[in-house]
Image (cartoon, rainbow, N blue to C red):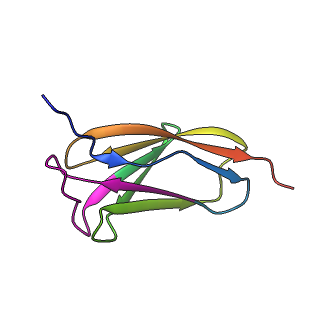
Amino acid sequence: MNIKNSISSKDVVQVRGDLVKFDAQFTDKDGNYLKNGTKVQFTIDGNNIYESYIDDDNGHANIEFTSLSRGEHKIIVKNLETNETQTFRAVILAGC
């Protein structure tokens, strides 16, 4: 059985106070990009749940934030079409 990941992204590193844009790319169970306007979900540190929507023809959705404290934060990404979740990191460094 060949299992396809339906979420593609990478960890991010930013300086505290800077705008953090976390982007992920989503596909359906057959590997086709999710359609523009499809709802997906991001959870930061297990507490803050953000709904987002695919915003292009290549299955991308993102969240933006500036309020994370210094340190490592867990971003859980969920594809609501396939129910797959993947975990990534946002590392926030001390500012100048």
User: In the rendering, at what x and y percent does residue 9 appear?
Assistant: 43, 49
> Closest to the observer: 81 or 23?
23
Instruction: Give the residue displayed 27% in from the left and 39% down from the top.
Output: 84
Quadrant of the drawing holding the C terminus: bottom right
Q: Give the vertical position of 17 relative to 44 (above or below).
A: below
Q: Quadrant of residue 5?
A: top left
Residue 1 on the magenta segment = no
Quadrant of the drawing holding the N terminus: top left
Q: Quadrant of residue 57?
A: bottom left
- 32 relative to 48 in the view: left or right: left
Most prominent secondary structure in the magenta stretch? loop
- 37 relative to 73 in the view: left or right: left
Please identify the residue farthest to the right as the structure is shown: 96
Q: Give the vertical position of 94 relative to 64 (above or below).
A: above
- Magenta residues? 21-40
Instruction: Give the residue displayed 38% in from the left and 38% down from the top.
Output: 86
Q: Give the vertical position of 72 relative to 18 (above or below).
A: above
Q: Give the vertical position of 42 relative to 74 (above or below).
A: below
User: In the rendering, at what x and y percent does residue 33 appear?
Assistant: 23, 59
User: In the rendering, at what x and y percent does residue 14 appear?
Assistant: 67, 53
User: In the rendering, at what x and y percent does residue 10 appear?
Assistant: 49, 47
